[in-house]
Image (tube, grey):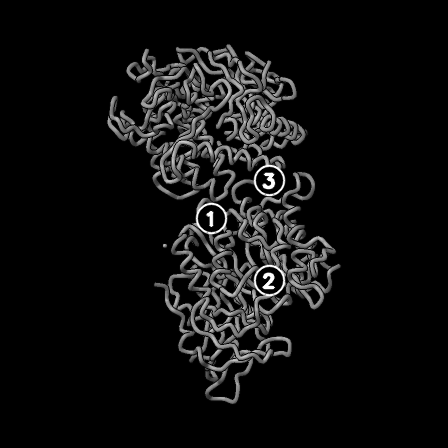
Amino acid sequence: MGYADLPRLPDQGESGWNIVRDVPRCFEESTINRHWKTTAGALLSAVLGFGSLTLSAAAPAHADSSMSTPSYESLSSATAGSDWMKRVPDGTNLGAMSVPGTHESLATFGGDTTQTQEGDSTQAGNLAGQLAAGIRAFDIRVRVVGGQTNSNGDYLAGSYAVHHGIVYQNAMLGDALNQFQTFLASHPGETLLLRLKAECTGSGTSCTDDLTETDAPGPSDAVKTTYRQNLFSHYLTLYPNLFYGPSVASTATTTNQAEVPTLGAARGKLVLTAFYGPGGGDYGWGLKQVSGLTNNAGASLANGDCGDRTDSSDHSCFVQDQYNVPNMMAIASKRDYVRRQLDRQNSDPDQDKKLYINYTSGASATAYPYSVASGCAAQICTSQGVNDFLLTYLNQATGTHAPVVRTGVVMMDFPGGALIDKIVGYNFFNPGTGSTASPSGSTRKADSFLLNAIDQHGSPDALRVPQSYTGGFFGPGATFGPTGYQSSFTYDNAVTVTALLTNHSGTDFTHAIALGDSLLYAQDHDPANDGRIRASYLPTPFITTLGRDYPAGTPYIAGWSVYTGNMAWAGMAFCHLYKATGDSRYLNGALRAANWIQANSADARGAGGYTGGFADTSALGDGSAMVQRTWKATEHNIDVGAFFTMLNQLTGDQTWKGRADNAFAFVTTMRASNGSLWTGTGLDGVTTNQDAVPEDVQTWSYLATLDPASAPSVDFAAGRMAATDGPFSGVSFSSADTSKVWFEGSAHLLAAYNQRKAPGDAAKAAALLSTLQLAQASAPNADGNGIVAASSDGLVTGEGDTYYASLHTGATAWYLIAALGGNPFRL
């Protein structure tokens, strides 16, 4: 919060007291009436397409919704959504990601011994449900049907049906590929991973491929292998644009497996991670790291040596798939395999370039797939299921176990929504290495407050901004009229955008986009048309219709001032949105804001840096008397340095790095001998302003740079600005008044502790988190969701402004960011 960013008195506005969605049809159709068999003896005929397959397979099996939990069989409760990968930067290696997946992804038929996923008679719906919930990795087992070959193993006819063991799963491979293709066409920012396995060994407990050889009595194992490869190659000709090319570059006679790609290289594509034969042999396609027999160091395996594991007979040591769980009591051992794979990955110094795959699934004749996942048999729970164990493990506080930086690809039976969301969340914040454990109920409430604030003054499809302060001093009354104080501050809106992106749910994402688009609109339709964004706007109406003072369609400006810090915060919000969406509009908006700052605030006096911007000094508050602020604020230069650093990262333009260095160099000159930072300079741009010492520059200087040299300023803020007001303890705005707690500043300090992780910081962070949650529940004018600005009315800043115990979007957004371990100054 910078100079003159606090609410002012109302201006009379327009409404009175207003302030300031054809993929190839599968060739299986021509072979559909060919005979094929299962060892179960059932004649399973198929016609093309999901939902149109003759239901002569086994009936759907386990589907007991009464056993659903957040970690088990509650797919539809996931909020990750259909576009979560779009928010992950292009340069992110798939090995650096946390990806939820499903084991035997279409196994929904055959009874409790074979069902591994929620489902009904419509496989299209089953797969669509997984995709919509955020599942991005799939495991499909196939059987040859209607196959014809010759002694060379050439493909003459045939197709792949989806099986789990002997049980046909009412789907063909082409059905799944069609649906993957449709999904990726609608969601081009996403990437899907697929592991294929030829299921049939021909043994008494397995299925048998339906394959005839035209020039010999029967195909040998070698001919079968070559045919299976050539059959898959035929699929590739039918889907020429579906797969990530390097992952399917091999043929039946050549092996050319791919390196793990970046997300940007694989967006909109299906990445084949491996195609295994019935005995586990590698068919040559996929990613060499996870399909070849290699250990964690990349060397060839000897005797299946995976260190503490010996289960590598058919896969790399980067894959944990210890599926044999002989009885319910052995679920504990399976849980330990899952945990050890997490530990193995997270202790690998090159984990951000290596794709680890961790199967939580397991089964046997006495421990069915759902029993292993849920810990329950016949609704009697005798052991903690693997799903619940994993969610609990990931939710445990820092220090409870080895840190989890990312989960890798997690292949699950019957995943629950909360478990899916937890895995996806690691792509956006890192609760394993710094964020304070935060009860999800509290952060959900804060998130809800922000979403409701955005929607209060506009329909879901409209551009809209939230009012920054509600209730208490700023509520309806004689001072602010029947609707209360309504200004929507640019700084608060920028922090809210970042908070919603940090929280990462689908609803948050759409609201962050709506708010970001509103800021872009304000920039694009400003009367000056030079990239500036004003200090504040009105939510009702946000866009003018009367055309009284400026053209209809102009955003309704409440505060005409243009401050450098606010411009930088709006720019950082645009950078976060560009990183999350890849939408160039946001990068263009950020560049316009940055160019305005450079043209209007760059200053050569003294230590350089950037001045404050322009203030509206007109008596009517109509922007008619804009005066340049020649002082330089430490806070504004921190904001500019962080913003320009983001632009350098996003564009590769070193000019922005030089400008960021300039801003941060100014900040360095403001450092006092005790490690704290002064406010800035006087009007001459040189003389240090040593009046009230603010909290924000102390914590923000560390958050923006993560420089150990700035760490002492965090401790200075915690000491010099320490404040207690009744049951609330935190920090105040500045040294001018420490009689009340500034909750936004206390969230700044929480975020800094979570990032710094020095000895003792976890305990300090926990205390601040407790205070903020108490404030959420019981501070004056609290509504149980949002956070008020101050613990009591009348918190003096020392800069001519006052904070009140009114609900505040900025304070609530900072709480959400800090509680989730986020940092708005860093991409």
Q: Residue at x 49, y 77 (%)?
A: 45
Q: CB under 8 Å between callouts 1 and 3?
A: no
| Amino acid type indicated by mark 1 | Met
> How many numbered marks does the figure carry?
3
Q: CB under 8 Å between callouts 3 and 2?
A: no
Q: Which numbered disc flags the more N-terminal residue, 3 or 2?
A: 2
Q: Is residue 63 left or right of residue 650?
A: right
Residue 12 in the image: state x and y as whole percent.
34, 18
Label 1 sits on residue:
85
Rounded to the nearest whole Å, what is the CA distance between mark 1 and mark 3? 19 Å
Q: Could you tell me which secondary element the residue under label 3 belongs to?
A: loop
Q: Nearer the viewer, residue 22 or 748?
A: 22
Q: Residue at x 31, y 23 (%)?
A: 14
Q: Is residue 484 left or right of residue 37?
A: left
Rounded to the nearest whole Å, what is the CA distance between mark 3 and mark 2? 29 Å
Rounded to the nearest whole Å, what is the CA distance between mark 1 and mark 2? 25 Å
Q: Is residue 416 above or below residue 679?
A: below
Label 3 sits on residue:
431
Residue 177 in the image: state x and y as whole percent.
44, 64
Q: Is residue 403 left or right of residue 159?
A: right
Q: Nearer the viewer, residue 342 or 395?
A: 395
Q: Is residue 351 above or below residue 717?
A: below
Label 2 sits on residue:
116
Q: Nearer the viewer, residue 755 or 768?
A: 768
| Residue 517 position by quadrant | top left
| Amino acid type indicated by mark 2 | Thr
Q: Which numbered disc flags the more N-terminal residue, 1 or 3?
A: 1
Q: Can I make out residue 601 in this image?
A: no
- Judged by depth in the image, the label closer to the viewer, 1 or 2, is 2
Residue 42 in the image: state x and y as whole percent.
56, 79
